[in-house]
Amino acid sequence: MASIQDLPDDILLAVFRLLPIKELIWNCRLVCSRWRDILDTPSLWRRKYQEEDADLGMPKTFYIFCHLERNLIKNPCGEDGLDFWDTATPSNGQWKIKDVFEKDSAKLQSWDFLQRNLFVKDEWIPYQEVEKCFAVYNGLCTKSQLITLKDEGYWDQLMDDGRPTIMVKDWFYSSFNSHYKLSVKLLSEDFKVIREYHSKNKYKYDSEYNNEWRQVSHGFHNIPPGIRHIFFQHQGLNFNWQQSSFGAKLMKCLKMAKDRGKSPRMRITKTSVTVGPFSLDRALYNRHGREIRHCHFSRCPCRGNYIHL
């Protein structure tokens, strides 16, 4: 006897178009990988966005951004070498892929950073172990990715009407002889800068971020219409101690690092760029005096763990 699983993909997609948004996200998408892949078709969500749905407890942009939210950075930890990254290495600089020390891996937090918004009905969040990182050798190294939002399923009207939060996060290890910088630009269709963030000299070699893994993050809130691309760039620099007055102190730091079995080189991993209605950055909200409102919607996929704008 034939079953619904025997239907071709185009027929299943036609059936899904008749169902409410909540049913698609909370029930249909969890059935199997085939249904999930069909439901991830951008044309389906563009059509659902145009339809009226009186049964929704919150605006439809919320549900659609919930569905789409994921890490838009490809190869964030170096598992695929330098694939998907555009690299620039002036002088003798060079990026290399290195293993994360086992004792450091636990410091990079265990919750899944590749897909923050998981559509599950229980409290289980998968463990996302970080085993690789990008290491800086022989000077200044820069790498970047250009994200075209339309290619990731975020069509123009959705971005302009929804005006979602764009959250950028990175993890870096800095010692006395290294310098980290982050730059993010929100671009228009013709690549004009609408908003941007630069960490400048906040994480330079003599800062407090020495000899440990630290997270750097920035949130773009209440973004204006017209954003079509996100340009992400970070760079690491191994400081040349021989040309400075800090040589003796640096040599002492390098010896201490060697004794502890740690690499003195700048390392970067666990990069993420997400677009959606959620933000986990409490400090950012407190710093700007924003009201923090946790979700109390009983069937929200975030399970009350996130801050809604």
Image: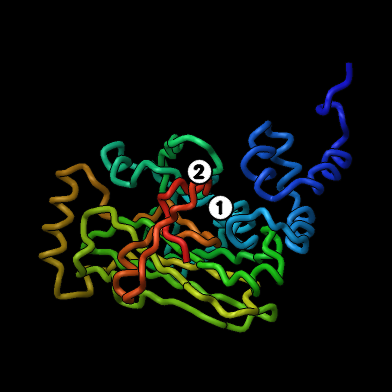
Q: Residue at x 53, y 38 (%)?
A: 120
- What secondary structure is marked by label 2? loop
The N terminus - image quarter = top right
Q: Position of residue 65 (x, y in %)?
A: 60, 58
Task: Name the side, left or right, on which 309 lies relative to 85.
Answer: left
In the picture shown, does residue 240 fall above or below 1? Answer: below
In the rendering, which numbered label is found on residue 70?
Answer: 1
Mark 1 or mark 2: name the one nearer the start of the chain. 1
In the rendering, which numbered label is found on residue 210?
Answer: none
Neighbour tally class for label 2: few under 14, some 14-19, many 20 plus, Cα within 10 Å? some
Residue 154 sits in which quadrant? bottom right
The foreground one among 37 and 238 is 37
Residue 188 sits in which quadrant? bottom right
Q: Position of residue 134 (x, y in %)?
A: 42, 52
- Is residue 115 in view from this perspective? no
Q: Amino acid at mark 2?
A: Glu
The foreground one among 16 and 84 is 16
Q: CA distance from mark 1 to mark 2?
A: 18 Å
Q: Residue at x 56, y 52 (%)?
A: 70
In the picture shown, does residue 272 fall above or below 122? Answer: below
Q: Position of residue 296 (x, y in %)?
A: 44, 53
- What secondary structure is marked by label 1? loop
Outermost residue to the top: 1
Q: Amino acid at mark 1?
A: Arg
Query: Which residue is denoted by mark 2 in the rendering?
Result: 79
Q: Position of residue 137 (x, y in %)?
A: 38, 58
The foreground one among 225 and 252 is 225
Neighbour tally class for label 1: few under 14, some 14-19, many 20 plus, Cα within 10 Å? many
